Image (cartoon, rainbow, N blue to C red):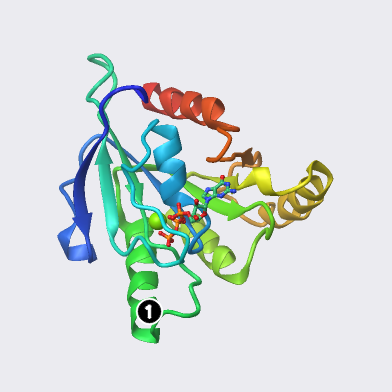
Amino acid sequence: LFAGDWQFFWASPSIETLPPMQGVEIAFAGRSNVGKSSLINALTNRNALARTSHTPGRTQELIFFKGPGPLDARTPELRLVDMPGYGYASAPKTQIASWTKLIHNFLLGRASLARVYVLIDSRHGFKDADNEVLTTLDKAAVSYQIVLTKADQVKKSALEQTMATMASSLRKHPAAFPEMLVTSSRDGGGMAGMRAAIVKLLRE
Ligand code: GTP
Ligand code: MG
């Protein structure tokens, strides 16, 4: 599945222009610059399927990527959804408001959304904007899991401490998986586990 041919499929600047719902969709949400687009590239073994950047605010629409088609007759088509980042303080206020609305509306109203990966920078842990998104996901009752990114940038001991603090805040969120995934798009850490979890979700 992940070694196959992934393609750009659709870009939506607004909730009115989403593609028809089909198959299984998995969305990647998180603060600006956390590594959403890089993670999609790492999972699909592509360098530049999703556009990445050093500066926050790169992804400005909901971007849908389509997998190489059903694995077999029982397995639905998979789409990965790259989302604009939230919590990006230096963008114009109207721009932030419109992205935030788009993100929350999409997460609340998409029946084909099977899982959301909420990405958190391993160096920073949860911020206020993350907690707001988790609360939206609890309301939507979409199953979601926390993915720590850029694990190559922190020492193991610091990461364990951040994860312990995060685990206690996660207990307040009923729709969250209690386990977090630890990843690095740079060194490939955690990719095999994430791919396996996605394949398992498709076969459920
Ligand atoms: P927006 O679309 O702007 O919200 O950002 P994004 O979340 O899609 O982040 P993106 O993938 O564009 O990556 C942001 C920056 O972080 C880039 O400079 C990436 O090279 C870097 N980055 C992403 N993943 C990793 C990682 O696992 N390790 C390290 N060290 N850097 C990473
Ligand atoms: Mg991006």
Q: Residue furthest bottom?
A: 93
Q: Residue at x 76, y 53 (%)?
A: 162
Q: Nearer the viewer, residue 203 or 7?
A: 7
Q: Residue at x 22, y 66 (%)?
A: 14
Vertical relation: 65 (above or below) 191: below
Vertical relation: 185 (above or below) 99: above
Picture coordinates of residue 47, whole percent (x, y) = 37, 39
Residue under label 1: 97
* Whether residue 186 can be seen here: yes
Q: Residue furthest top?
A: 72
What is the crowding at mark 1: few (fewer than 14 residues within 10 Å), some, or many (at least 20)? Answer: few
* Whether residue 142 can be seen here: no
Q: Which amino acid lies under the numbered mark 1 shown in the image of this protein? A: Ala
Picture coordinates of residue 67, whole percent (x, y) = 27, 31
Q: Which quadrant of the structure image shows residue 127?
A: bottom right
Q: Which quadrant of the structure image shows residue 6?
A: top left
Using residue 10 as the reference point, say whether residue 86 is left or right of it: right
Using residue 65 as the reference point, say whether residue 161 is left or right of it: right
Using residue 64 as the reference point, say whether residue 39 is left or right of it: right
Q: Residue at x 24, y 22 (%)?
A: 70
* Mark 1 close to ligand 1, CB under 8 Å: no
Vertical relation: 84 (above or below) 45: below
Picture coordinates of residue 140, whole percent (x, y) = 42, 56
Picture coordinates of residue 155, whole percent (x, y) = 78, 45
Q: Residue at x 40, y 30 (%)?
A: 45
Q: Secondary structure at mark 1?
A: helix
State the quadrant of the N terminus: top left
Q: Nearer the viewer, residue 168 or 197?
A: 197
